[in-house]
Image (tube, grey):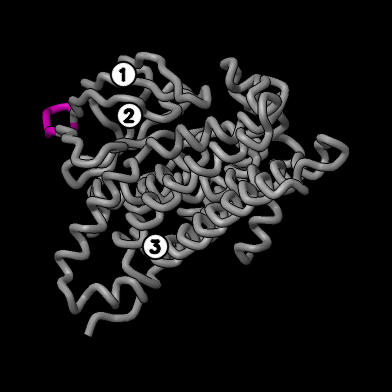
């Protein structure tokens, strides 16, 4: 199935089930089990792992990104990106994935997860802040010391927290034996998982921004002031142009990073560029959209805040723009003067 058909299928499912009322209920603490069951039945949670032809293969990234784009557009309150990555990690190591939503570790750059061998197996000792959806996970997949394993949430000390969007972001204190521990394949390590997390956030933000643009343009055409739609005023038109410019830039660079993940470019460089540029765009898009909407955009009844609060939340996860800008500088400096142009164009380094 092509990524276009996958995206259309995801759009139909989320349009039917991810209603504003369901999103509000999820933010109040009720996990949308019916929506999750529909997502699992459609195979969306396995999109990244299912298409892998060999361990560590990212051949399913295009389908996964197509689904996540629509999840961002509809502000879907599910750990879809987290489960995709977790199941891909398990599949790469040859571990059977449990059904239901999953979380994974590490989620921070350079975090030190101490997995040590003992008589009962492998024990993990760590403290990790703001783990997405930890309380809702059937299991937490951990990658540490070159090993992939499973942790039961019942064995962890979980301190509940939430993001600006009202989604679970929990602090974990871990001192537990991991189950089903197997070696990770060559190339699968913490930095790769961190980049995948950043890529999913870039794709989610790109999708959410497309929807912000759509509803903002619609509002500008529907809202009349001084006898004509506010979209006819030059100041509003300029704001809409800036909004559209940033949405287009975010979509292009997120798509380029997806292609790089599939093996058509430098993944590290592309993800750094995407998370930096998309994060910058997210701030401008949210700001501009609320300026155009005025007070109505901040009300609980309007769906704009479902999108903008997620943009602000996702922007801060898996590295902010300044962190990825520094990473871009490191990569460019390491390649040297002759390597910069091939990085920018995606051509092979001679």
Q: Which residue lies furthest to the right in this view?
A: 227
Q: Position of residue 207 (x, y in %)?
A: 58, 48
Dot 2 crowding, Cα within 10 Å, few <14, some 14–19, many 20+: many
The answer to whether marks 2 and 3 mark residues whose Cβ atoms lie closer than 8 Å is no
- Which of labels 1 and 3 is toward the front? 3
According to the picture, the residue beneath numbered tag 1 turns out to be 156
* Image: 317 above or below 255: above
According to the picture, the residue beneath numbered tag 3 turns out to be 261
Q: Give the Cα distance between marks 1 and 2.
A: 8 Å
Q: Is mark 1 on a helix, strand or loop?
A: loop
Is 118 colored magenta in this rendering?
yes
Most foreground residue, 9 or 253: 253
Chain-order first, disc 1 or disc 3: 1
The answer to whether marks 1 and 2 mark residues whose Cβ atoms lie closer than 8 Å is yes
* Image: 216 above or below 116: below
Q: Is mark 3 on a helix, strand or loop?
A: helix
Q: Residue 151 carries which label?
A: 2
* Image: 73 above or below 35: below
Residue for point 36% across, 71% down = 265
Q: Is the magenta stretch mostly helix, strand or loop?
A: strand
Q: What stretch is highlighted in magenta?
A: 116-122
Q: In which quarter of the image is the N terminus?
A: bottom right
């Amino acid at each position: 199935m092509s990524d276009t058909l996958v995206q259309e299928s995801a759009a139909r499912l989320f349009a039917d089930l991810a209603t504003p009322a369901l999103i509000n209920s999820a933010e109040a603490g009720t996990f949308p089990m019916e929506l999750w069951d529909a997502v699992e039945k459609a195979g969306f949670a396995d999109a990244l792992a299912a298409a892998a032809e060999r361990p560590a293969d990212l051949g399913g990234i295009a389908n996964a990104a197509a689904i996540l784009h629509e999840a961002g557009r509809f502000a879907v309150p599910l750990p879809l990106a987290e489960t995709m990555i977790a199941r891909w990690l398990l599949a790469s190591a040859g571990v059977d994935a449990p059904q239901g939503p999953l979380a994974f570790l590490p989620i921070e750059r350079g975090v030190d997860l101490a997995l040590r061998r003992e008589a009962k197996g492998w024990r993990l000792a760590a403290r990790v802040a703001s783990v997405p959806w930890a309380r809702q996970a059937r299991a937490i997949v951990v990658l540490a010391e070159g090993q992939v394993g499973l942790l039961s949430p019942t064995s962890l000390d979980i301190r509940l927290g939430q993001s600006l969007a009202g989604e679970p972001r929990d602090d974990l204190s871990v001192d537990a034996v991991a189950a089903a521990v197997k070696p990770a394949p060559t190339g699968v390590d913490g930095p790769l998982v961190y980049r995948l997390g950043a890529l999913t956030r870039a794709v989610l933000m790109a999708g959410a921004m497309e929807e912000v643009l759509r509803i903002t343009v619609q509002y500008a055409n529907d809202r009349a002031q001084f006898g004509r739609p506010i979209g006819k005023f030059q100041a509003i038109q300029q704001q809409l142009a800036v909004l559209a410019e940033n949405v287009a830039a975010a979509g292009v660079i997120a798509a380029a990073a997806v292609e790089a993940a599939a093996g058509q470019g430098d993944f590290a460089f592309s993800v750094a560029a995407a998370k930096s540029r998309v994060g910058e765009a997210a701030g401008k898009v949210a700001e501009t959209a609320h300026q155009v909407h005025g007070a109505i955009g901040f009300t609980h009844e309007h769906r704009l805040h479902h999108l903008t609060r997620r943009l602000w939340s996702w922007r801060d996860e898996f590295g902010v723009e300044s962190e990825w800008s520094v990473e871009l500088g490191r990569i460019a400096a390491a390649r040297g003067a002759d390597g910069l142009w091939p990085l920018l164009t995606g051509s092979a380094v001679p």
